[in-house]
Amino acid sequence: MLSLRNLHACYGQAHILADVSLDVGAGEVVVLLGRNGAGKSTTLKSIMGLLPPHSGEIHFDGARIDGKAPHDIARLGLGYVPEDRRIFTDLTVEENLEVGRQAERAKTPLWTPERVFALFPNLAEMRHRSAAQMSGGEQQMLAIARTLMGNPRLLLLDEPSEGLAPVIIAQMARSIGELKSQGLTVLLSEQNLHFASQVADRAYVLEKGRIRYQGAITELANDPDARRAYLSV
Ligand SMILES: Nc1ncnc2c1ncn2[C@@H]1O[C@H](COP(=O)(O)OP(=O)(O)O)[C@@H](O)[C@H]1O
Ligand SMILES: [Mg+2]
């Protein structure tokens, strides 16, 4: 469904991503692991067109998308939840969902607030609450919920477990598992290997902007040398 080929990305003179290639198949949950500064967010921004690649190619559903504008990429069916969440804190939960609502897309089930509330039951209980009065974990769930209202075919999540309490991380893992069982394709970035191993089928590990490992996440979890070399665990 998504394929990155020999991607290079730069901020000004700084060469950040070098020769990154990765694939995400329809229905898969794939995780991009790596320490702080490894290039995870840069990879997701490159996919969304927020940082146009210096060279290399990005294909989504057979169409080349590198060089397209972010709103055109989003319209093709890519939903993106950035690291900083960007929900509207002066709006209620329900209003945030309405802001995210988009037209139905062929081959994709239509998301409604009720369907979102079934996935994140604690959002249902606070649907009239202002987002400013929610915890970090609830805001993260709302950010994902709002993106789902755009009916994406591929969901990009930038470190969804970052800064959340363990009990909320467990809820997040269940929700992502539920999305997968409903057939949604997900590419997420993470530093938390335990969380990643609960949700992902396959992993890529980035170090200093290069892919250092790719394979089953269970293999990575059982390989202390690789963990020490590329991750903080
Ligand atoms: N806007 C920016 N301008 C210049 N350098 C940046 C910018 N954003 C990130 N970087 C640098 O790019 C590298 C990768 O960052 P990032 O993709 O955010 O890593 P990660 O998400 O894995 O923590 C880091 O060295 C970071 O300092
Ligand atoms: Mg990041």
Image (cartoon, rainbow, N blue to C red):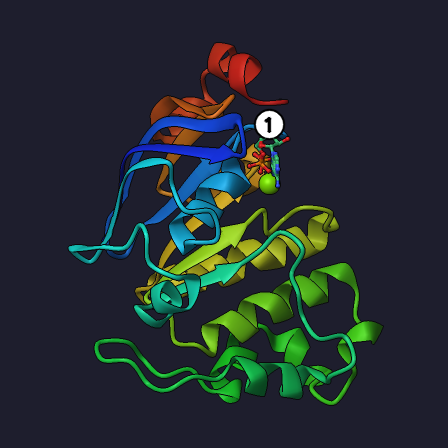
Q: Dividing the image into four equal quarters, which quarter contains ligand 1?
A: top right
Image coordinates of residue 171 in percent, x first then y, are 61, 59
Q: Is residue 18 left or right of residue 105?
A: right
Residue positioned 79% across, 71% down in the render: 134
- Confirm if mark 1 falls within 8 A of ligand 1: yes
Image coordinates of residue 106 in percent, x first then y, are 22, 80
Image coordinates of residue 21 in percent, x first then y, are 29, 32
Residue closest to the eye, 119 or 139: 139
The amino acid on which the numbered mark 1 sits, given as a three-letter code, is: Arg
**Given the current orientation, which residue lies at the most extreme right position?**
133
Residue positioned 63% across, 48% down in the render: 161
Figure quadrant of residue 105: bottom left
Q: Residues within 10 Å of mark 1 (few under 14, many from 20)?
A: some
**Given the current orientation, which residue lies at the most extreme left position?**
62
Residue closest to the eye, 67 or 216: 67
Whether residue 188 is situated above or below residue 19 in the rendered picture: below
Residue positioned 67% across, 75% down in the render: 122
Q: The C terminus appears in which quarter of the rendering?
A: top right
Residue underneath mark 1 = 35
Figure quadrant of residue 140: bottom right
Residue closest to the eye, 193 or 61: 61
Q: Is residue 101 left or right of residue 172?
A: left
Q: Is residue 193 left or right of residue 179?
A: right
Could you tell me which secondary element the residue under label 1 belongs to? loop
